[in-house]
Image (cartoon, rainbow, N blue to C red):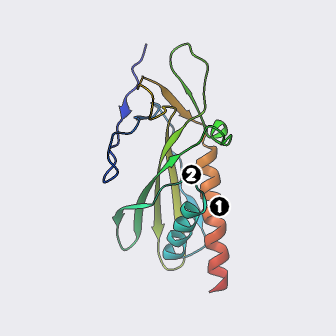
Amino acid sequence: MRCTFAVAFALLGLGGARAAVAQSPGTPERQPTTVAAPFLVTWNAVERVVKSDPVNGRLDLLSDGTAGRRGRWRMTIPASDFRAGEWATCQSGAESAVAPREGVVDVAVTGDSTASTVLVTARWSAQNPDEAQRAIECRTAGRFEREAEKTIRSRAEKEAKKQ
């Protein structure tokens, strides 16, 4: 049986450890979504999208350059949020698959004053932070990533037309 490697993320300033977020091996590389809007307009759209969903935590800036930015946010998904079952499936051994309860989302925006690209990547965990931790593998369906990129592109292009 192949081992699943989990990447543990520590919470800075919030205290306590969080559940490990497992990335399934062999996840295919995706191409970024092209956005017909300037780089800064697209990044502002990312900020608005993150703030618009109550399951999202704050957007942390990981790197900032003249032609690109990378950010990350956490998601805490309540059991009542059935969207998560469409985003990923998580399974441990022979147990039945379950929806994720947490996610770590990375976003990369590159571009210039006329056009940009956005790439969203999510890693999921089915662990309840209040329960004992166990090995579990989550496989993204890619739906969350595609929908997030589509929403960011739509908002950025709409804003660019106003300018």
Within-10-Å neighbours for mark 2: few <14, some 14–19, many 20+: some
Q: Tag 2, which secondary structure?
A: loop
Q: Is residue 56 above or below residue 41?
A: above
Which residue was labeled with disc 1?
151
Q: Position of residue 62 (x, y in %)?
A: 35, 59
* 37 relative position to 2: left or right: right
- Count of numbered marks: 2
Q: Which mark, residue 55?
A: 2
Given residues 141 and 104, the one toward you in this image is: 104
Looking at the rendered image, the quarter that the C terminus falls into is bottom right
User: Quarter-wise, where is residue 41 in the image?
Assistant: bottom right
Give the spatial CA distance, label 1 vs label 2.
16 Å
Mark 2: amino acid = Val
Q: Position of residue 19 (x, y in %)?
A: 41, 35
Which residue: 42% across, 17% down?
2
Given residues 99 and 148, the one toward you in this image is: 99
Q: Is residue 29 above or below residue 131?
A: below
Q: Which mark, residue 22?
A: none
Q: Position of residue 4 (x, y in %)?
A: 41, 25
Q: Position of residue 3 (x, y in %)?
A: 39, 20
Mark 1: amino acid = Thr
Q: Residues at badges 1 and 2 in contact (C-beta under 8 Å)?
A: no
Which residue: 54% across, 37% down?
101
User: Quarter-wise, where is residue 50 in the image?
Assistant: bottom right
- First in sequence: mark 1 or mark 2? 2
Q: Is residue 160 above or below residue 54?
A: below
Q: Is residue 141 above or below residue 163?
A: above
Which residue: 61% across, 24% down?
97
In front: label 1 or label 2: 2
Which residue: 62% across, 79% down?
160
Within-10-Å neighbours for mark 1: few <14, some 14–19, many 20+: some
